[in-house]
Image (cartoon, grey):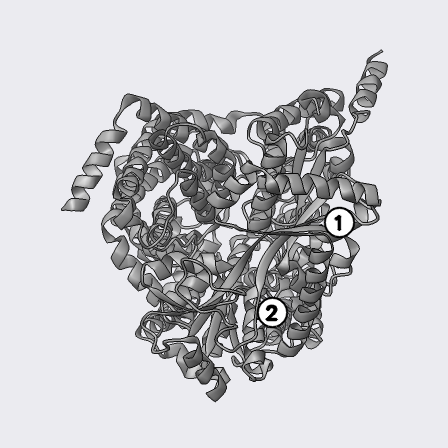
């Protein structure tokens, strides 16, 4: 809160963006509800009705958010280290893409390494092998001993012999 | 050096031979449910009796089995080692979800087990028999609330068929859908609804304990140990079996189909399978070949007709 | 007192040293797997159930009871220490518990959770033993309109978990309600907000959303704030044990949590998380330290944790008396019972008293064992926070995704995990509370379905909603819960409170 001078008041960008998102979400819900068949049967409240209530409420919240953007003092969010966040998110994306083909251990090993990278361990040559070994141990415990079905790739086949 | 070793390992791992009678069974549902249990029982029996050396089960849950079915059809065309477990619920789900793939896209092998539906009321109800219920339904369909499983499922279809057979407009039925049998059973026991429809197994223990009255069952003939008439002998022409089946991949050759059918037949005739069915309380309703195909087509036709009548499918 | 003698008989059987060892193995395994972030009790029990195969029935049953209670308890540890609840019933624990852990009070938070779970488990197991036949009658009397009234009460009281800004809290809640629309409408079979994607037809899994928004969102948030160094966590400050003051503030919360949690667990359509919501709301209303709520109030951990475990025992009421599994965990337990030739149902207490009382005795022993195991381990768990962050969070990400991959390894599910994780991160950055999103996703469909069922049974008559004494009473409470704080606020008391809270930002 400190260091912000309320005299140079500009609209709160984050609140405005939220207003826009809420309006869009509300609009999509109303559009989707409009194409539903109203087969509410005896209740008088069909599947579209509840959706519509929520849609209108979202539009109302969008207006509220828009007004607040101009009238309330914006709370400035803490400065974010975007690159770190992207490393972690990238790790997840890599896991999703590789899971089917490379198997659990390799895909999850990359998630492990990229997350560590996001938290400041930069040496991927160290963290990737550590991650793969860690994920492989997790795989062997959960799939081997506990029979949890996890996607298997070449490494897993090698260790479970199938 | 490291790289060549690694590449060698990869090659070795990928080049695993697939045995002719290995199977991968897809259970298009979460672990623990009926289809999953069917798949896992098959796995056990096929391996224990040496019919197959290695059987794996894969769960692909979602949308009444249609998510798994779509994946099965798109990935396995022509493969003779892929099986999928399914059931009557899938027939309805394919229609209500407007699924792009249907049971016509797989190669049906055999019906394995089945369960009949039961119509019940709480013991405290003034309805004594199925005719009493039908009379109420005819007088004011809205006043008869039916509890059962999800919309468009077997239970809902049964109610639609009963209404139709009784000459009541199926769109006028007051069906209250619950998730899973447990919640519906609680609603029936608590007299929140007029009547309940679900698999006989859901109600049997409560009926034996005197909390529920079974008005009728949907089988062709009376079921031993159940003190209730069939719908048919009560003058309502409704027979409905909630069956489970096994099917193979689309586009397989006749030889592949014959081999799978032979393996399944061996499995069904094994003692291990019979014991497993008995402990799980499943009825053996094995039906294979053209007889099953004909039964399947008839079920699909009647289900799509009744779902249109109820108004769930346009 | 036939019941009592059966219980004593069961206990004496279970005191066999070999069986005690089984109990110890059970709780250790249950805690060990349950403690992993992203892996909740249902998955824990499902995974470990086969471990109990092949022993004699008494041994299996007792080990199984240990796994069940161990798994239920394990989730609270990561919830408190790492802000990563593995399932929806420990979300509320994370709210206050993690604030305590960050301030170096992780030890007392874990202790109050462990002791609260023990006491709630003990009382609720005894209630299960002696009151089950009566409780189940009340539970069956709950019709759709009564559930709807209960949901209204939950919605209104839970709003106290929304933080300082009513606008931000409501936005979070309605995002949750909007997400709840996704999938097939259960009552008519129509797809809503699914856009033709078949994987969306089953809706958004509560566990996926909870793990994404809490565990992943937290990891993103900590990564994003790394540079500023705002996020220093102190592992231990002061004693790792509870002080006299902690005890004084906890014991009433434990008892209240038990009283709230047990009956809600016994309702066929209840769900453990609703008990934790209501318990948290009750503690927040009754506390003498309102300024601490949101910053690590020990009552806010003690109450919900007790409620969580009491409702775990409550779920066994419909399971043992009616054979009704009312939660995912209960469904898996049913499979577990069947494995021992125990067919839960209305006749179980009559036909098989030894086994039922053996099970209840096992649960009591597992509960004691859990306390013995976990109190000494608290000092060790707290050390988790001293693991260097790169390794700690890398490990959290692995386990958080493992739970989802194990349950449903579809790229769509994992992509949802990523999207909701980023959403949780952005909401954290901009000060929107996370818990209401999950609350909306859980309560929204329940409220909608029960409303429509109630109206359908009454053929559209709106007055049915106040037509039963239960529903009328619950709705009256809801109105009171809504109006009283407004009146207080108008009289100025509320303003002072919200100012106090706002200064914490």
Q: Position of residue B103 (x, y in %)?
A: 74, 57
- In front of the other: label 2 or label 1? 1
Q: Chain of mark 1?
A: B
Q: Position of residue C190 (x, y in %)?
A: 65, 69
Mark 2: secondary structure: helix
Q: Which residue is mark 1?
A: B71
Q: Chain of mark 2?
A: A
Q: Is residue B153 above or below residue B250?
A: below
Side of B2 relative to C485 (left or right)? right
Question: How far is the residue under mark 2 from the one under mark 1?
Answer: 40 Å
Side of B252 relative to B298 (left or right)? right
Side of C63 relative to B83 (left or right)? left
Which one is in front, C261 or B69? B69
Side of C304 relative to A46 (left or right)? left
Badge 1 local density, few (<14 within 10 Å), some, or many (20+)?
some
Q: As drawn, which residue projects farthest toward the top?
A: B1
Can marks 2 and 1 be said to lie on one chain?
A: no
Mark 1: secondary structure: helix
Residue appearing at x 32%, y 22% in the figure: C18
Residue appearing at x 61%, y 71% in the figure: A51
Which one is in front, B308 or C401? B308
Residue B42's quadrant in the figure?
top right
Q: As drawn, which residue projects farthest toward the bottom?
A: B139
Mark number for residue C78?
none
Q: Position of residue C239 (x, y in %)?
A: 35, 29
Which one is in front, C430 or C28? C28
Query: Does any portion of residue C485 appear in the rendered image?
Result: no
Q: Count the labels in the image.
A: 2
Q: Position of residue A157 (x, y in %)?
A: 72, 25
Mark number for residue A61?
2
């Amino acid at each position: 809160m400190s260091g912000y001078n309320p005299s140079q008041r500009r609209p709160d960008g984050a609140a405005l963006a939220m207003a826009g998102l809420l309006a869009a979400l509300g609009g999509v819900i109303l559009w989707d509800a409009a194409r539903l068949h109203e087969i509410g049967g005896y209740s008088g409240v069909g599947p579209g009705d509840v959706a519509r209530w929520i849609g209108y409420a979202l539009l109302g919240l969008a207006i509220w958010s828009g007004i607040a953007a101009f009238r309330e003092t914006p709370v400035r969010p803490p400065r974010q280290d975007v690159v770190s966040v992207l490393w972690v998110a990238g790790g997840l994306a890599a896991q999703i893409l590789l899971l089917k083909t490379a198997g659990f251990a390799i895909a999850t090993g990359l998630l492990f390494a990229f997350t560590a990278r996001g938290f400041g361990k930069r040496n991927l040559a160290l963290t990737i092998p550590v991650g793969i070994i860690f994920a492989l141990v997790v795989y062997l415990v959960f799939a081997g001993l506990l029979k949890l079905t996890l996607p298997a790739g070449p490494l897993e086949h090698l260790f479970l012999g199938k | 050096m490291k790289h060549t070793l690694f590449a060698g390992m990869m090659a070795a791992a990928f080049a695993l031979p697939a045995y002719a009678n290995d199977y991968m069974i897809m259970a298009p549902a979460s672990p623990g449910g009926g289809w999953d249990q069917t798949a896992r029982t098959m796995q056990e029996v096929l391996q224990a009796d040496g019919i197959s050396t290695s059987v794996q089960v894969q769960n692909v849950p979602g949308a009444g089995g249609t998510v798994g079915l779509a994946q099965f059809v798109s990935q396995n065309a022509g493969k003779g080692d892929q099986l999928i477990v399914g059931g009557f619920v899938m027939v309805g789900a394919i229609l209500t979800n407007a699924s792009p793939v249907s049971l016509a896209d797989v190669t049906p092998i055999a019906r394995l087990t089945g369960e009949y539906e039961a119509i019940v009321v709480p013991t405290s109800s003034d309805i004594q028999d199925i005719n009493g219920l039908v009379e109420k339904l005819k007088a004011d369909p809205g006043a008869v609330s039916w509890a059962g499983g999800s919309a468009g499922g077997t239970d809902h279809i049964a109610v639609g068929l009963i209404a139709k057979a009784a000459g009541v407009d199926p769109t006028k039925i007051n069906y209250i859908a619950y998730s899973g049998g447990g919640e519906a059973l609680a609603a029936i026991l608590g007299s929140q609804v007029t009547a309940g429809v679900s698999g006989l197994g859901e109600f049997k223990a409560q009926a034996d304990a005197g909390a529920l009255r079974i008005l009728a069952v949907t089988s062709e003939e009376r079921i031993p140990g159940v003190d209730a008439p069939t719908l048919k002998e009560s003058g309502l022409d409704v027979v409905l079996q909630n069956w489970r089946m096994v099917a193979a991949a689309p586009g397989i050759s006749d030889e592949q189909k014959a081999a799978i059918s032979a393996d399944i037949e061996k499995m069904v005739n094994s003692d291990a399978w019979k014991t497993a069915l008995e402990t799980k309380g499943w009825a053996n309703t094995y039906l294979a070949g053209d007889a099953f195909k004909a039964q399947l087509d008839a079920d699909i036709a009647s289900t799509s007709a009744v779902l249109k009548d109820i108004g769930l499918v346009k | 007192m036939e019941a009592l003698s059966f219980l004593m008989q069961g206990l004496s059987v279970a005191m066999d040293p070999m069986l005690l060892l089984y109990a110890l193995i059970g709780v250790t395994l249950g805690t060990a797997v349950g403690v992993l972030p992203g892996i909740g009790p249902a998955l824990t029990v499902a995974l470990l159930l086969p471990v109990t195969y092949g022993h004699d029935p008494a041994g299996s049953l007792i080990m199984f009871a240990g796994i069940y209670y161990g798994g239920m308890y394990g989730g609270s540890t990561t919830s408190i220490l790492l802000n990563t609840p593995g399932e929806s019933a420990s979300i509320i624990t994370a709210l206050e518990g993690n604030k305590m852990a960050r301030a170096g009070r992780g030890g007392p938070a874990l202790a109050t959770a462990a002791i609260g779970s023990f006491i709630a488990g003990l009382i609720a197991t005894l209630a299960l033993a002696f009151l089950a036949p009566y409780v189940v009658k009340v539970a069956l009397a709950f019709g759709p309109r009564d559930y709807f009234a209960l949901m209204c009460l939950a919605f209104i009281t839970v709003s106290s978990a929304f933080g300082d800004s009513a606008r931000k809290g409501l936005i979070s809640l309605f995002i949750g309600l909007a997400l709840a629309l996704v999938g097939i409408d259960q009552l008519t079979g129509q797809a809503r907000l699914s856009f033709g994607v078949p994987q969306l037809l089953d809706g958004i899994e509560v566990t996926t959303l909870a793990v994404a928004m809490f565990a992943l969102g937290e990891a993103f948030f900590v990564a994003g704030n790394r540079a500023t160094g705002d996020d220093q966590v102190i592992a231990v400050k002061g004693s790792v044990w509870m002080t006299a003051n902690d005890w004084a503030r906890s014991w009433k919360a434990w008892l209240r949590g038990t009283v709230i949690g047990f009956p809600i667990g016994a309702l066929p359509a209840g769900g453990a998380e609703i008990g934790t919501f209501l318990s948290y709301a009750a503690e927040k209303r009754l506390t003498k330290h309102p300024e601490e709520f949101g910053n690590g109030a020990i009552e806010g951990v003690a109450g919900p944790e007790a409620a969580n475990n009491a409702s775990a025992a409550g779920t066994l009421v419909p399971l043992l008396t009616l054979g009704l599994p009312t939660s995912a965990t209960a469904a898996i337990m049913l499979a577990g019972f069947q494995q021992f030739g125990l067919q839960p149902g209305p006749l179980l207490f009559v036909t098989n008293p030894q086994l039922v009382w053996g099970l209840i005795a096992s649960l009591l022993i597992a509960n004691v064992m859990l306390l013995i195991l976990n109190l000494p381990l608290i000092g060790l768990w707290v050390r988790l926070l001293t693991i260097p962050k790169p390794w700690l969070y890398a490990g959290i990400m692995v386990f958080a995704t493992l739970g989802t991959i194990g349950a449903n390894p579809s790229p769509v599910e994992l992509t949802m995990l990523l999207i909701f994780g980023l959403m949780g991160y952005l909401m954290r950055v901009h000060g929107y509370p996370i818990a209401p999103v999950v609350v909306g996703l859980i309560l929204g469909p329940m409220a909608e379905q029960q409303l429509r069922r109630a109206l359908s049974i009454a053929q559209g008559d709106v007055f049915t909603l106040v037509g039963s004494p239960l529903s009328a009473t619950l709705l009256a409470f809801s109105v009171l819960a809504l109006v009283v704080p407004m009146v207080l606020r108008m009289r100025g008391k509320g303003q002072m409170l919200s100012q106090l809270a706002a200064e914490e930002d």
